[in-house]
Amino acid sequence: MSGPELITLGCRLNIAESEAMRTLAGGQDDLVIVNSCAVTAEAVRNTRQAIRKARRSRPDARIWVTGCAAEIAPQDFRAMPEVDAVLGQQEKLAPASYMGDGVPAPVERPAPFTRHARAFVEVQNGCDHRCTFCIIPFGRGESRSVPLDLAVDRIRALVDAGHREVVLTGVDVTSYGHDLPGEPSLGALVGAILDRVPDLPRLRLSSLDSVEIDPQLVELITGHERLMPHLHLSLQAGDDMILKRMKRRHTLAQAVEMVRSIKAKRPEVAIGADIIAGFPTETDAMFENSLNLVEECDIVHGHIFPYSPREGTPAARMPQLDRAIISDRAARLRAACVARRAAWLAAHVGTRQRILVELNGRQGHSPSFAPVAIPAAWNARGGQIYEVQVNAVENGLLIAGEAA
């Protein structure tokens, strides 16, 4: 093994930060870093399980825990006998944290994504909003943006290192720029990347808040082929009363209109969404509105979360639903998303797609993030882009035939 082992849970921002920690930790082969998630109670449980599994598999290693769960409840992880150290969110990206035992201070540079086909670049962190269900602001702090020129320089360096696709990540990416001089929008950042890094073939966005998508970003989404036709929206619910109780800033009508206006100009844009099932006070009728959202917004990449009360959030003090009801509603939402996705995948048969190959060389993703199985005989190179003919759909995967 060369360097630390990183165990990453949760979001794409965590993936970006894990790669930065891999670089900072240098050649510390005896180190395991668990980068935790706190978005749900299940995510915290998964973090604990990952820590225990790491100790069983590597009894002599040092195990450090960081990330949102560790930031919110550091005492809980320090109490685990498997854990040697807990790093806060600021400490985990500080070079000084990795300089013990004679390890030299590392040179700060964009982290190479040797374990991912695409590079994840943090352009924003933290969140100024306080949705009633969300614990993440307590783990990430206030919204902070990476200066535009610095973000562009980081992406240029990654492209020069051979990356063919970059994903912009953050906690609340569409709030980008409000804290910077001149308040550049996310659209301004995306436009600068596309203009100033012409050798980048594919730029992709992580989760967006539909109400904050600015006009320049809409223009780029609908008109620039190098910006991938794949939007993941933080919708959370399809009922206006539930959205209000969640303290979301959009209405159902606003979200639906945003999706319809984008797809009217660029029909191939695939929509993903986060939806919470069984939020406190959700009635049957309110749930049906969320179920209808799958069709109204043509959601083909659905991320369904059974509501999980997080201690310290306002929603945890609201009247809770029975867990069986929550589970049933989550299952129905997932089934609706699966059906919508199946029809969407079937529509790809007979088309040609440019796919970015994952590092295993056996699967890739289209611009709209449809998964594509690649014949082993190709000996496809991970991280490269191929144009393929889609011949069929099997087990949720597009099946590639010939390559152009």
Image (spheres, grey):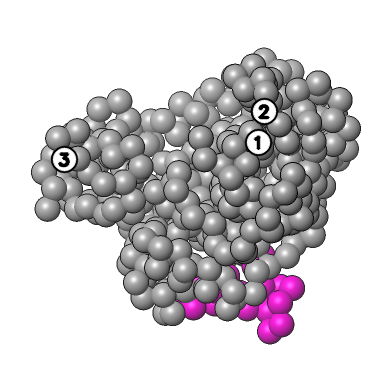
What is the spatial separation of the Cα atoms under label 2 and label 3, in whole angstroms? 39 Å
Residue at 68 percent across and 84 percent down: it is 182
Boundaries of the magenta span = 175-192
Above-or-below relation of 359 to 142 = above
1 vs 3, front mark: 1
- Residue 87 appearing in the image: yes
Picture coordinates of residue 242 (x, y %)? 71, 41
2 vs 3, front mark: 2
Specify the quadrant of the image occupied by residue 53.
Answer: top right
Picture coordinates of residue 219 (x, y %)? 44, 73
What's under tag 1, amino acid-wise?
Answer: Leu
On screen, residue 207 versus residue 196, left or right, reads: right
Which one is nearer the viewer's eye here, 166 or 260? 166
What's under tag 3, amino acid-wise?
Answer: Trp
Residue at 59 percent across and 37 percent down: it is 29
Q: Which mark is residue 31?
A: 1
Specify the quadrant of the image occupied by residue 315.
Answer: top right
- Residue 140 appearing in the image: no
Residue at 54 percent across and 77 percent down: it is 188
Picture coordinates of residue 222 (x, y %)? 39, 67
Q: Secondary structure at mark 1?
A: strand
**Marked residue nearer the N-terminal end (1 or 3):** 1
Farthest-out residue, front:
102
Which one is nearer the viewer's eye here, 183 or 21? 21
Above-or-below relation of 109 to 65 = below
What is the spatial separation of the Cα atoms under label 2 and label 1, in whole angstroms? 6 Å
Q: Which mark is residue 378?
A: 3
